[in-house]
Amino acid sequence: MQQPGQQPQTVSVIGLGYIGLPTAAVLAKNGVNVIGVDVNASAVATINAGDIHIVEPGLADVVKRAVHDGLLRAVTSPEPADAYVITVPTPFTADYDADLSYIKAAAQALAPHLSAGNLIILESTSPVGTTEQLADWLAEARPDLSFPKTHGDDADIQLAYCPERVLPGQVMHELVQNDRVIGGLSAKANAQATALYNTFLKGDCLLTNARTAEMAKLTENSFRDVNIAFANELSLICDHLSINVWELIRLANHHPRVNILQPGPGVGGHCIAVDPWFIVASAPEQARMIRTAREVNDFKPDWVYQQVQRTIQAAAQQTGKAVDAVNVTCLGLAFKANIDDLRESPALAIAQRIAAAHSGTTMVVEPNLPATAQPVANATLTALDEALSEADVVVLLVDHTPFKAITRAQLEGKLWVDTRGLIDG
């Protein structure tokens, strides 16, 4: 039984994706016996072989060592542990409501293995009230155990919400260094969760209740979404007024109290593109600016696509080619620079839409995916130099480091749509 302030001996991490696997690896690196759980049998086999199935700098070596030392193993269904950390997806539905089915499935899977003294931490980004819903699902499955809603600190099972706050590409650093918000359903849950994170955390543990912790995570990402929407809306206005948005922002940011973000083709990833809708769904009459920002950012890929269509027509006129003979190259598919994560990626959506509509050749360049990948139907994953050489139209969608080395000479005679300011900026 885990006591307040006592570090758990065995932790089960449910969901071994972009957050779960690094969390499991960091815990194991710090001497905790970790059982990773994922329904993806291929991912489980890869991890047990000491390899990784995702791209994250610094992760491979930690996983390899943890598996070699016997501190990390992966399975396809939960096993008994002292603490459980749930890091499963929480997508939204077509109506922008949260899909909590993965959390419910995790609760149903681990419920038979619970015993008095266990701690359950939910890390998945979730609407306000989800941790309480998780406790209700578990209480329904295990009426023989008590939970904080009725027994507080004396409950058999303690629960807390502790959202991840890391940046893809820097997860292994930020997982350890960033402060952690911990929202327990009881004071005891807060103490137990603090002890778990203190096995590796160098940042502070900031204690609150579960509902506030849930809202904190949504607020952080909604703040960023609103600021990105301002930059994206500026890019639309500047195009209408024939102003270089990159120069405009650079000049405006010389003001000591102005720090405008850079526009892009939209907003992607599982957090910023999703979380604001959870707030809107829970308070639709009040969340007016958050909704508008989301609508601006959701519109930006459509606007970029229309820009590409006009540029293809212009390229046909410039080269004397038929439209279906114009070669289009899309640079980047990930939702941000220097990662392989395609979740909610506007770049991927734009490339897919171009390839589906364009009757000519569409090439895509994504240096963070294997050459055998086929992320875009009707398009060929191509090496950068070849894709630039063959292109009539270049669509720059992601500011991956290799793209920053593209020269004007490589673009000679070509037309382009630059959503990241690497060319026009």
Image (cartoon, rainbow, N blue to C red):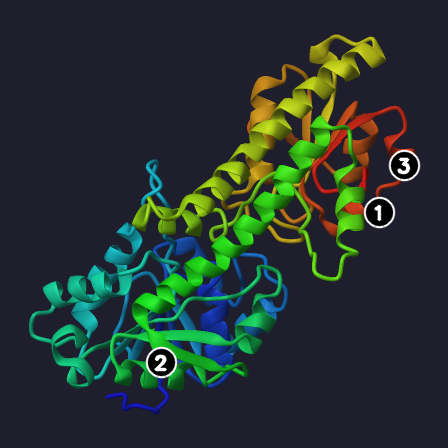
Q: Which residue has dot 2 on it? A: 193
Residue 215: percent from left, percent from top: 38, 62
Task: Using residue 62 as the reference point, say whether residue 82 is left or right of it.
Answer: left
Q: In the rendered structure, are the residues bearing label 2 and label 1 in contact, judged by CB atoms less than 8 Å apart?
A: no
Residue type pointed to by label 2: Ala
Task: Using residue 151 as the reference point, say whether residue 228 is left or right of it.
Answer: right
Residue type pointed to by label 3: Arg
Q: Which residue has dot 3 on it? A: 408
- For this orientation, the residue located farthest to the left is 144
Q: Is residue 244 visible?
A: yes
Q: In the rendered structure, are the residues bearing label 1 and label 3 in contact, judged by CB atoms less than 8 Å apart?
A: no
Q: Which mark is residue 18?
A: none
Residue 396: percent from left, percent from top: 72, 37
Q: Residues within 10 Å of mark 1 (few under 14, many from 20)?
A: few
Spatial separation of the CA atoms under disc 1 and disc 3: 10 Å
Spatial separation of the CA atoms under disc 2 and disc 3: 53 Å
Q: Which residue has dot 1 on it? A: 405
Element type at mark 1: helix
Quadrant housing residue 122: bottom left
